[in-house]
Amino acid sequence: MTTRPEPDGGELDPGLSAIMSERRQLINLAYRLLGSLADAEDVVQETYTRWYAMSRAQQEAIESPGAWLTKVAGRVCLDLLRSARVRRESYVGAWIPEPVPDRSEWISGRSPDPADRVTLDESVSMAFLVVLEEMTPAERVAFVLHDVFRYPFTEVAEIVGRTPGACRQLASSARRRIRDSAPAQAPAARSAEIVRSFKQAWAAKDIEALVALLDPEATGLADGGGLVSAVLEPINGAREIARVLVELATLVPDLAFRERTVNGRPGLVAHLDGATVAVIALEVVGDRITQLWAVRNPEKLRPWTEN
């Protein structure tokens, strides 16, 4: 991002360090609100552009620059969420949130600033983000700001443009959605075992082994964004998912999978001829995989390593 030039004499802007220290918080907030790292980066850029568009006197009159930056970023996100519903009506196939890797797996040189990286916890698991996608923009903003980032409802109200009481109701409604739609996932270690067995069964083209690892009511979704080939409709049922996976392995015998951390949970990354071609997030409940999200859209694979 482009920052304000140094003043005459080469002295750094005395407020720059404090302002830029908010960058990681803003990236993390915007990603959880939007489910897109690219959009989150744009929001942060826009937020800092608005800050530096003000005069020094206007900046110094702001009691809490961090709170001001958060308020602006939250409002920009809210506007984007409202427009995103319209944009996604014309999106080709399913829209899946952009997957992010563990901090050790970013492409070297792509994100040298740790402030550009998303902190991984349960609030960025793919299952969690997918439930957030089902909320209204106001519900999502109120819930994420209050329940995830612990902002008081008085501050949330200023961002959402409603009363604190209304924001409390929005967050409560969102909380019910989370409780009703997101079953407790298996511990990470157990999930990793299931994912490893799944990868091995897939490589062996063993339909029965795949069926045994999948919940009978499992669902698979793929996101190609109209840029690459991907199944456009959800795939329902363990046996149908297994059949499609084995067919894919047969058609593309050189496809290789590696176990990776996807949004803080065990997942898989697919490579073909040295390039990353898909990132697969999985939800494991008990000893079965209940959901598969395969992101093929190359615009959503930028942060992923190829080694």
Image: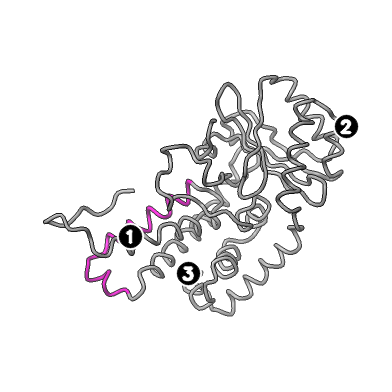
Question: Measured along the vertical axis of the image, is residue 148 above or below residue 243?
Answer: below
Magenta extent? 38-62
- Give me the residue at 82% from left, 51% from top: 286
* Mark 3 and mark 1: Cα distance apart in space: 16 Å
Identified by mark 1, the residue type is: Arg
- Earlier in the chain: of badge 3 and badge 2, it is 3
Is 47 part of what is drawn in magenta?
yes
SS of the residue at dot 2?
A: helix
- Give me the residue at 27% from left, 75% from top: 61
Question: Measured along the vertical axis of the image, is residue 45 above or below residue 276?
Answer: below
- Earlier in the chain: of badge 3 and badge 1, it is 1
> Pointer 3: what residue?
159
Question: Measured along the vertical axis of the image, is residue 91 above or below residue 83?
Answer: above
- Magenta span: predominant SS is helix
**In terms of image quadrants, where is residue 249?**
top right
SS of the residue at dot 3?
A: helix
**In terms of image quadrants, where is residue 70?**
bottom left
SS of the residue at dot 1?
A: helix
Mark 2 closeness class: few <14, some 14–19, many ≥20 residues within 10 Å: some
- Earlier in the chain: of badge 1 and badge 2, it is 1
Q: In the shown orientation, is residue 143 left or right of residue 48?
A: right
Tell me whether the residue at label 1 lies in contact with that at label 2, contact meaning CB atoms closer than 8 angstroms.
no
